[in-house]
Image: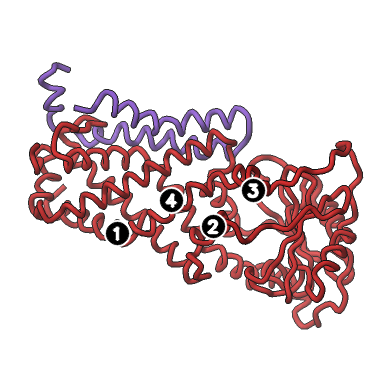
Amino acid sequence: MTRSGIRAWYLVHKWSSLVCTAFLLMLCLTGLPLIFHEEIDELTGGGTPLAALPADAPLQSLDRLMAAALASRPGETGLFLSFDDDRPLVYITTGPRADSPAADMTTLVYDWRTGRPVGALDDEGVMHFLLQLHTDMFLGLPGMLFLGLMGLLFFVAIVSGVVLYAPFMRKLAFGTVRASRSPRVRWLDYHNLLGVVTLAWASVVGVTGVINTLATPIIQYWQAGELAELTAAYKDQKPPARLGSIQAAVDTARRAAPGNRPQFVAFPGGGFSSKHHYAVFLQGDTPLTQRLLTPALIDAETGALTAIKPMPWYAQALLISQPLHFGDYGALPLKILWAILDVVTIIVLGSGLYLWLGRRRTPLESRLRELESGGAAVIGLP
Amino acid sequence: MSSLESRRGPGPQRLRTILAWPCAIALLSLIGLVSALTGDGLRDFLSWAALAVPVGAIAWAWRYRRR
């Protein structure tokens, strides 16, 4: 690479990193406990033990559970009803209005077999605080999009870092750490080694994180586009005066797509459906199709199936990005690897910051010379 | 590699040589990231093994390439 090429990439690496480092450190630190949120929730008593019943115990009607939820939240309306992957639980989310923001929602949990409440989802605790900080820093959509921009810069920093890695390593064998030299040389070598081996993991977690920050606009785009088209016949109708059976809606959806099971039901007037439909989101039964959703749109008044169509590619991209960002799809060993790689990323960020803070002692020109010489002309001899 | 060479490191390397290990590790990481997504059981094991490679590479470099 030419001298001016190296200089340009060096500046790209420096500035993209500098702008995002503080936020990335926050994301890596809050993300670390979030990897294990299921285990932590279980340990801290979030998982109430369920009544021991035979495996084939009959399930209660969803309408009964819904009525119980609404009775305990007077004046509120149903927003979502969702199912657990592993346990016979039904989560019912209610709010003051059909389009209530997330902050005003309450989620009650019911045992599907007994119809009894088993608690409400905790939206106070430390884990919830960490999740909010990690998702949007308590700033809502602008905060989310801002963190997405930081994630994008992180990706730019990774790419430019790899571009600089090549000339720097010209005279150094892979993995070399000159630990006996000055702290600066040692940490530069660690920065390069740790950065380059975590390249793919950090890129995937970074880019899928960016896609996750776009969840709101992606769903809004689907709602205003494809969903509006599928329910175009209802455009000028008044919203349903009375909502029909949810159980019947779920049954109709299952019949329309055999082999699938419902993941959640979105109620009319909310962010995931039209004003006139229950949107029953079905998931496949293989590990891969389990992530991909197909909404069945059921007329909330008559219970008739209006349309059923898989989510478009941009929404599927969002759905696939979620596990790839969370690391929750390969049991505990994967989570442990996720945590180790997260800590390695923290070291890469920290060492990068350390190298930048020590910059005054090494002028830009000599840092560039160091890169050009293939790591040979090191600065700061021991 | 003689002791002298290992202390000084190799002479100028081609781009392919420099990027061989990083690319191999990146490729294995990607296989690991995707395989657990496509199934359970054996695919989970493959995922753990493949994603352990970057971690192992760090341990290896720390043990054998520190000087």
Mark 1 and mark 4 residues within 8 Å of each other at the beta carbon: no
- In this rendering, which labeled residue sits more in front, label 3 or label 1? 1
Q: Residue at x 77, y 60 (%)?
A: A92
Which chain does the numbered disc 1 sit on?
A
Where disc 2 sits, the SS reads helix
**Which chain comes out purple in the rendered image?**
B
Among numbered discs 4 and 3, the one appearing first in the sequence: 4
Residue nearest the viewer, comparing A217 with A257? A217
Q: Amino acid at mark 1?
A: Ser
Dot 1 or dot 2, earlier in sequence: 1
| Disc nearer the start of the sequence (3/1) | 1
How far across and down, in percent of the image, does residue A325 sit?
Answer: 51, 49
Task: Estimate how packed mark 2 is, as few (under 14), some (14 to 19) or many (20 or more) residues with alpha carbons within 10 Å.
Answer: some
**Place of residue A131 in the rendered image (x, y in percent of width and height, measured from the top left):** 54, 57
Q: Colour of chain A?
A: red
Give the SS element for disc 4. Answer: helix
Question: Residue A152 placed where, x, y %?
Answer: 39, 59
Q: Are marks 1 and 2 in contact (CB under 8 Å)?
A: no
Identify the residue at image location x=48%, y=36%: A337
Residue at which label 2 appears: A131
Cα gap from disc 1 to disc 4, whole angstroms: 20 Å
**A350 sits to left or right of A355:** right
Q: Residue furthest top?
A: B2
Residue, disc 1: A16
Could you confirm whether marks 3 and 1 are on the same chain? yes
